[in-house]
Image: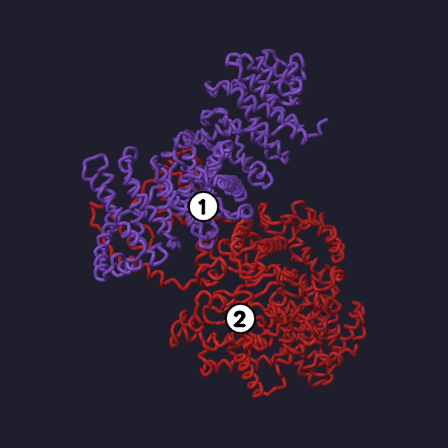
Chain colours: A purple, B red
Amino acid sequence: MAQIEKRGGLLRKSSASKKPLKEKVVLMYDEIFMTEDPSKCSPRFWEELFLMKVNLEYLEGKLESLDSEELMKIKDNVNCLFQHCIQALGEEHPIRVVNALQTLCALIRGVHQKNKSTSGFDIINMLMGFDKAELCMKNLMESLDSLLCAEGSESLKSLCLKLLLCLVTVTDNISQNTILEYVMINSIFEAILQILSHPPSRREHGYDAVVLLALLVNYSKYESVNPYIVKLSIVDDEATLNGMGLVIAQALSEYNRQYKDKEEEHQSGFFSALTNMVGSMFIADAHEKISVQTNEAILLALYEAVHLNRNFITVLAQSHPEMGLVTTPVSPSPTTPVTPLGTTPPSSDDEHRLHSGKLCLIILTCIAEDQYANAFLHDDNMNFRVNLHRMPMRHRKKAADKNLPCRPLVCAVLDLMVEFIVTHMMKEFPMDLYIRCIQVVHKLLCYQKKCRVRLHYTWRELWSALINLLKFLMSNETILLAKHNIFTLTLMIVNLFNMFITYGDTFLPTPSSYDELYYEIIRMHQSFDNLYSMVLRLSTNAGQWKEAASKVTHALVNIRAIINHFNPKIESYAAVNHISQLSEEQVLEVVRANYDTLTLKLQDGLDQYERYSEQHKEAAFFKELVRSISTNVRRNLAFHTLSQEVLLKEFSTIS
Amino acid sequence: MGDMVVEPAPLKPTSEPAPSPPGNNGGSLLSVITEGAGELPVIDPEVAQKACQEVLEKVKLLHGGVTISSRSTQLELVNGDNVDSEIRCLDDPPAQIREEEDEMGATVASGTAKGARRRRQNNSAKQSWLLRLFESKLFDISMAISYLYNSKEPGVQAYIGNRLFCFRNEDVDFYLPQLLNMYIHMDEDVGDAIKPYIVHRCRQSINFSLQCALLLGAYSSDMHISTQRHSRGTKLRKLILSDELKPAHRKRELPSLSPASDTGLSPSKRTHQRSKSDATASISLSSNLKRTASNPKVENEDEELSSSTESIDNSFSSPVRLAPEREFIKSLMAIGKRLATLPTKEQKTQRLISELSLLNHKLPARVWLPTAGFDHHVVRVPHTQAVVLNSKDKAPYLIYVEVLECENFDTTSVPARIPENRIRSTRSVENLPECGITHEQRAGSFSTVPNYDNDDEAWSVDDIGELQVELPEVHTNSCDNISQFSVDSITSQESKEPVFIAAGDIRRRLSEQLAHTPTAFRRDPEDPSAVALKEPWQEKVRRIREASPYGHLPNWRLLSVIVKCGDDLRQELLAFQVLKQLQSIWEQERVPLWIKPYKILVISADSGMIEPVVNAVSIHQVKKQSQLSLLDYFLQEHGSYTTEAFLSAQRNFVQSCAGYCLVCYLLQVKDRHNGNILLDAEGHIIHIDFGFILSSSPRNLGFETSAFKLTTEFVDVMGGLDGDMFNYYKMLMLQGLIAARKHMDKVVQIVEIMQQGSQLPCFHGSSTIRNLKERFHMSMTEEQLQLLVEQMVDGSMRSITTKLYDGFQYLTNGIM
């Protein structure tokens, strides 16, 4: 106790050394922590309390120091304090409101920190008392709602949002936070939307509002009906959705900017190891934690918006002039540049890099499945210059990205996928991410085939990246097979080639690109041959991979047909013309001349895919993600940023 | 609204015993008229009325007044709508006249108009020839404008002012710039004569109001700023913008003091201010009250014009009808201004697209495109289709606008907004079965989450639990007509016969499909408009319609417009009028010359809109993209020399070439480089950009001294100098010139009136009109004219200046 008092006293630096002078407010807190009703002896106790500058640390520390039994003893006073806080929210003078908000934060945090193990119901009882809880929370939410919607002080609104964030993140697992039931019943959804739809308030509080919304949506997402999910999914007001998109885009572009700065600093360092694109997470240590996590929260918000709300995609597709101004090199649309795929070797503390990477790929998957988003991505009229952060590798220099062509956004997505494929072949193989990556490419191809979109893209890069990936899988067969079923991925890759081979006429840009496909396959025939012998071996053995491997054997039929058809022709051409090494042009000539004698087999279901579904497959991932976001938001909730000095200045009308 | 001082003067001319027939020289004729009763310097209504009565008496004696009453009946019929009742509610004096006329008509019950005329002819040779002209069938709007301009006689002017009501609206609309320029820059009498008609039409049509307001603003801008503020043009403009000229009957319906009156006028509350996003530099004109409060000056000026009784009504009336439209125009201009600040085409394009997407949020609204020929509401701007046009320092841009046609703009309510994504559900289910979900699947998804709101529209497709690979029947339903294989699906390798395909077929289909697509232009970031303009219009309409949430509506239409910001389009408008006049002259005289006047909307002295010529790209773009000579391009696009398609394209080329050569000669159109000449899909050439006409030429470098642009490439397309088509070309020019000469007055008049009070460079110097007239060579015989045409063609052919100029343009602007 003494120690805490000292801490309270420390706030007054000058006097601290001499004598632990107690602030009046601390004395009043002490009165609350007595069992007696503090208003008994001084009837104006509560009124006075909210005129005092809040001592958060003391209050929180005091609550923390009490064990649950002691806390139960002063339950009545705590309840009373809570109620009076809520009452004070309705007061006219903002200073009281501010103090009440801060006191509430301290109360909620203090009670929770102490009672980590206790159930949510106990906490509700402790704070409000069961009998009054419902009314209490109703009043609280209503006050917050009206404060957020009123044309009042911006810092007051900010404080309201901080309180809400504090409330939402007090538990690690958001779904165990029983108080949120009341937040579900008394929705503040509309207030959040309002903040997002008004440019001035959006600029001030957009970030907090979006994070809060993302978290609220994840409250018992899979267990019960969450009204925020329902509401978010039906929002169709463009101004609001636009605002939300803008907040997300700005947060992400800020992140990109930071990354870029860092990257320039550490140009030669090890830092720029295995990363790509905008969002890799190599930011110096001190800064790292915060920026990584903010990123996750905002990505989650983007995901929820894309996933839940159909209309949001249209907003994504609409770029905003404001954004165009901020970052010219980055596309003004939040879609792609937003997708930080920074995934590093999943060493000990790189969990959330994996998380972010996965989340990004999930977002891209959702986008690639969406009709409207695809139309936008492929729109020939909407060209963007997307600056992908390519990291330097041994065999390639950091490309000077000065002369980036301006292309439809989908080219950037494909580039990104190629980049991912090329840069993540490592021992700790991120199988899950690779599968998602190939799925994204596949979904995009399906769209192009359906809609006859002939994208002018250098498909060759994709093909050689895919073949390299196959090579990697084969050379690390034994290590990888111990952990993963590599045949799912192999089959997907082979089927991508099959898409090109059998449906190339529907989406390839030129006849010569079809020739190039054959050239690439013939050129790399060794890899396919090896793959075939491997899967043949495994499918004839009666091992656990028998079935999976045999599927790949079947899928390889066309590629093998091509190789077997053209290779002899090329050899004889070389023999006839006495050339030892044929040039590309000569090979292409042979290819063109011999199409007609080649028969291919049409494979089934190449252009079909399984739709993304969160509930069944990704629930665990999202629970974990939300948990880590909660922890970080809680840690970063900075009450000191909203120091009372600022508020006092703002409300200096105080007499 | 009783401020209109409409004197009963129209009947004045009848009093004049002016027997001189209308000749070529309007001035001398007028001097004859003025010697009569026209001494009154300013027409005092009472005096005028008295005089009028006297005249009427006389007329009654002379020809039984039938002429007058016949006029009034004419008045009622010509314009279809009930003009005279409108007039009565407009202003009292004419009504009085009418009554008198009616009386007279009643007194003289006998005799038809025809009979009266015959009698009149017999009776006196002394009577007014002028009146006879005015009443003859030959008297058309062109003559009316001419007399209005040339006559110094208030009586004549006032008569014509009233006579305007008898012409068809479209006919008068053509001369609106002339009328308004006269109103602004000529004396009181002309203004007074014109005003009632303008006011009347403004009451009828919101579009007319807008055009008037814009033109009045634009043509007042050359005045000195101090005089401009108090000029009649500015006052009339304010009157129109104050929305006092809304339809009279509606006004009566308005509850004058009802607090809800702000919704009274427009059937829908939706204005351009749909959502207040931060998109545009918007000013809120949403309520009249606000406006008057914030800008009392405007209100004061309005009151000067409006009668005291109505000012009360005014202050409580509904929001200004024109506000949404003006807001819309303002937003478009603001976009143009912002684009101009960006350095590269690419950035401009991106910015344009995003700006327009925000504009979209406010649509549909009670706005329209004034360049369109029918009533409609703008519902959407397909923002991704917009392109920035080639211009060195300004940023003109082309937008496509989706509109819904309606019967009557004022009475039809604004269409409801259909969200952008609404198409997705229909599209994904119908056209793209793979990306959508079937109903069973959707229903199935709800069984897993029964608690959710049953709003399936709202649900994201993804939320439907485990969706396995598409069911076979969904797959076979697929309307995929691209690849025949997608239908031939086999469910497993073992159970069914495998399907084999030839690799050669795939490759062949690929090249065939690419060959079948019409020759599209390559995308060039430095010239984004080339691709957009090359795409056939029908194709574009179909494509945009498919992608639009409004596309399914039967009254959906696509319009396009070029928004110019920072350019003075008044010369363009003048050129449009001249071209239009020439076109109708040639049509009337059956000369098969082809020109394409494109509509111009002057918004202010430095902004406006242009109706783009569809299916046309500039010759510069053609040459740059195709890297072919013009003839080879024709062969590529239309087929070989002997094909029907080529021949008709060639004929079109010749006819349009001849037409534009004449235009260029008559108007002295300069700055003729290949970027300013378009070629349409049928082979016509179309000249655009009339920035340098008549007395102005670019930089006065002395270039382009030849009469018009005729390069060897053009001649090659025509089949060479000795070909039949080239002779046909020269013959067409001769015929065209003869026809134009015949109607020279109609052409000159347009230009002459616009010269009034104008600072436009095309009127620089004092001899503009004289030179223009000289170019018609009234004194030459047809043989001489033929020689002239030969000379001009020869001169242009030999002229190296044309070539030089093209080289100059290539060096300075990169135009091929």
Residue at 18% over, 39% down: A540
The residue carrying mark 1 is A388
Left or right of A42 in this view: A290? left
C-alpha distance separating marks 1 and 2: 42 Å
Q: In the rendered image, which quarter is residue B640 located in? A: bottom left
Left or right of A143 in this view: B45? right
Number of the label disc, if any, that sits on residue B767: none
Q: In the rendered image, which quarter is residue B598 located in? A: bottom right
Closer to us: B781 or B51: B781
Q: Secondary structure at mark 2?
A: helix
Q: Identity of the amino acid at label 2?
A: Gly
Q: In the rendered image, which quarter is residue B453 located in? A: top left
Q: Identity of the amino acid at label 1?
A: Leu
- The chain letter under disc 1 is A
Q: Secondary structure at mark 1?
A: loop
Rendering coords of residue A444 (x, y %) = 38, 48
Rendering coords of residue A244 (x, y %) = 52, 40
